[in-house]
Amino acid sequence: MNSIDQKLSEIKKNKKLGIMTHVVVGYPTLEKTVQIVKTMAECGADFVELQIPFSDPLADGPTIMKACEKSLNNGTKVRDCFKIAKDLSSQVSISLLFMAYYNTVFKYGIKQFIKDSKAAGISGLIVPDMSIDEEGNEKFYAYSKTFNLYNIQVISPASTEQRLRKNAKIAKGFVYCTARQGITGVKEELNPELSSYLKKVRSHFSIPLAVGFGISKKEHVKALKKHADIAVIGSAIINIINFSKPSEISKNVVQFMKNLDSK
Amino acid sequence: MKNKHQNNGHFGLYGGRYVPEMLIPALEELEKAYTVAKKDDSFQKEFTDLLNNFAGRPTPLVFAENLTKRLGGAKIYLKNEGANLTGAHKITHCIGQALVAKKIGKKRLIAETGAGQHGVATATVAAKLGFSCTVYMGEVDIQRQRQNVFLMEQLGATVVPVAFGSKTLKDAVNAAIKDWIENVKDTHYVLGSVVGPHPFPTMNRDFQSIVGREVKVQMKKREGKLPDYIIACVGGGSNAMGIFYEFIKSSTVTLIGVEAGGKGEKVGEHALRFKGGSVGIVEGYKSYFLQNKDGQLQKTYSISAGLDYPGIGPELANLHDLNRVEFVSSKDREALEAVRLLARTEGIIPALESAHAVAHAVKLAPKLSKHKIIVVNLSGRGDKDLFILAKAFNDKKFMKFLKEYTQ
Ligand SMILES: Cc1ncc(COP(=O)(O)O)c(C=O)c1O
C-alpha cells in the first residue's frame, strides 16, 4: 500500500476536504523548508508537495518562479531535496510528494530518480511536463509502477474528453485539476465554471480530485468542499513566507492554515 | 541520409512534446491545422504570394567575387536572406504561422525575441494580417537591441520586458509559453525557431525550407551543379534547417552549422551546445542543452543575441549525431572581423549572427580548391547591430553623436 492511499481513506472516513500544501525546497533556506513542512503537518496538511527548484519552471507563475530562483541562488542541489525528503519522512506522518520538472528527473536518471525517491520516503511524483505521449521513450510511468510511486497527473479546464480519458488510464492516487487554465499563482476569485469542469473530470476518473492553482482563502476552500476531495495550496503560502520575518514564518503559516479551515 | 522517426515530432532521440497537459490541446489543434494547410493549395498560394509580394522573395544568391579572390580558394556565394522585409529570414515562418493561426480563428499573436528580428517580423505580419501582438524580450536583449523595441512598438506591438532568469532569449521563451498557457483560446504563439514542442520544429523547418529550394535552383542556373559546402549560423536553427533541408539527402554537399564561440571556453562565455552541453528536456523538447549536472540551464553568452540560447533544434541534434551536419564555432572577435570584411569586399553588412557563418567561410575557403563552391546563408542584415558594432569598433564619432543627440 502507498501512503497516499492511507491518507485518502482517512480523508474519506472523516468526510473532510484533504489539504495538500506546497514548498519550494531551499526557499527561503533548507532549514526553513524542514521547519515549514513540519508546521504544515502539525496544522493538519495531509500531503505536502516538495518542489525541486528548476531554472526554467514552465508551469509556474512569478511567485514560485522567484522562489525557485532564490533557492538555486542559495545553492540548493537535487541531492539536497532527497536528503530533506528523507529527514522529513522519518519525522512526519503525512504523505510527501516530489513536484519536479522533467529535466530534473531525466538528468538524474529516470529509474534512479524514482528509486531514490522511494528510498527517501516519497509517495508520489508530480511532473507536469512529462507527457503521456512520451512514455514510449521515457518509461517514467513504468518505473513509477515498479517502485510503487504514484504519478499524479495534472489536467486543466482545457483538457479534452480524449485527453481526460488518456490521463484517467494512467493516473494514480488522485488527479490534480488546475482550477483554471493558467500558471500557478494566487487569484481573488475561483473559476466560475469550476463545478461543471470537475463534474466532467469525475465522469472520467474513479480516483479522488485535488484542485489547485489560485487557492488562497477560506472562501475558496469552503467552495471546494462541495466539488473536490483535496485542496492544494501553493503560491499563497509562499506569499506568507515572503511577507514574514524569518523568525515568524512558522507562526504565520500556522495562522494562515488555521484560518483556511475555520468556519 | 534519412531522417527517421519523424512521427510525433521525434527526430531520432530528440524532439517530442514535453509540455504540461494544459498545452496539449492547443498543440494538437495547431498540428492538425498545419497538416491540413500543408496540403491545401489555397494555403500554399496565399503563403507564396505573401512571400513574393510582401516579404520580397526570392532572395538573391550573390557571388562574392571580391571575397573569393581575396581568400584565393573556393568560390563563395551568399544567400542574402537579409534582403527580406524586416531584414532577416524570420519573416518567412512568421507569415506561415500567422496564416495557420488565422485558419484556427486566433486573434492575437505572441512571440519571444532575442535579437529582436523575430519580434519585428511577428509584429510586421500581425500588422499586415490584422492580429494584435505582444512580444516578450529579455531585459538584457532590450539593452542591446533597443531600436528593434522601438520598431515593434511602431508596428503596433506591445513589448514586454522579461526580468527573470538570465533575462535573455530562453527566458523570453518561458514568458511567452506562460502567456500562451493563460490565453490559449484566442492566442497563437509564433515560436521563432525550430525549437519547442511538436509541431514547431517541423512546421518552421517546412516554412523555411524555401531557402534551400531557391538555392538549388539558383545554383543550377549559375554553376550547373550543387554546392560543395553550405554554412549557416545556428541559434535555435531555423535559418540553418531552412537552407540545409533540401540538401540533406545530397551526400556530396557538406553541411556546416556555426555556433557562437563567444569570448571563451568557460561556462557563461559561449553558446556551444554540442561541445559544452548534454541531452536534456527543456521548453517542451528533447535536445542538447547547456546545463549543469542537476539539469539547471546555464548562462550563455554571445555578442549576437540571436545565437545566445542554451538549446538547439531537435532535428539538428539528430543530424549532429548522424554526422550529417558538422558543427563548428566562431568567436565574437571573428564575427566582428567578418562584418568588416564583408562590408568592404562585397558591400553587404551582415547581421552579427550571420557573420559567424561568414567567419567560418573565411577560414574554410582558402583550404579548398578553386573548383569548390561554398554557399553561406546570410540570415540577416546588420542594420539592427548598429549600436553594438559602433561600440565594438570603438567608433568615437558615433559615441559623440549619441551623447549630443540625447542632450
Ligand atoms: C539574423 C539572424 N540570424 C540567425 C538567428 C538565429 O536563429 P536561428 O538559428 O533560428 O536561425 C537570428 C535570431 O534572432 C537572427 O536574427
Image (spheres, rainbow, N blue to C red):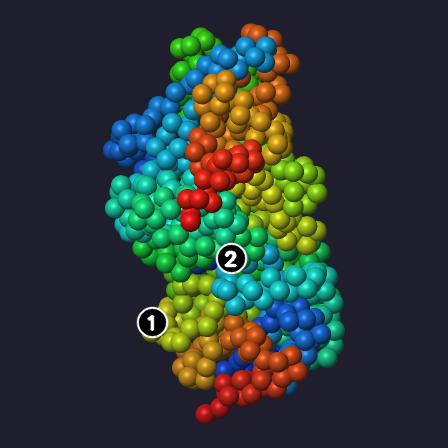
Classify residue A252 by image quadrant: bottom right
Residue visible at 34% across and 32% down in the picture? B85
| Nearest-to-viewer mark from 2 and 1 | 2
Pointer 2 local density, CA inside 10 Å: few below 14, some 14–19, many at least 20: some
Classify residue A7 by image quadrant: bottom right
Which corner quadrant holds the C terminus of chain A? bottom left
Q: Is residue B315 above or below residue B283?
A: above
Do circles 2 and 1 both sit on a common chain? no
Which corner quadrant holds the N terminus of chain A? bottom right
Tell me the amino acid under the disc marked 2: Ala
The residue labelled by disc 2 is B163
x%, y% of residue A142?
A: 62, 56
Residue visible at 45% across and 84% down in the picture? A218
Residue visible at 44% across and 37% down in the picture? B384
Element under label 2?
Answer: loop
x%, y% of residue A241?
A: 58, 77
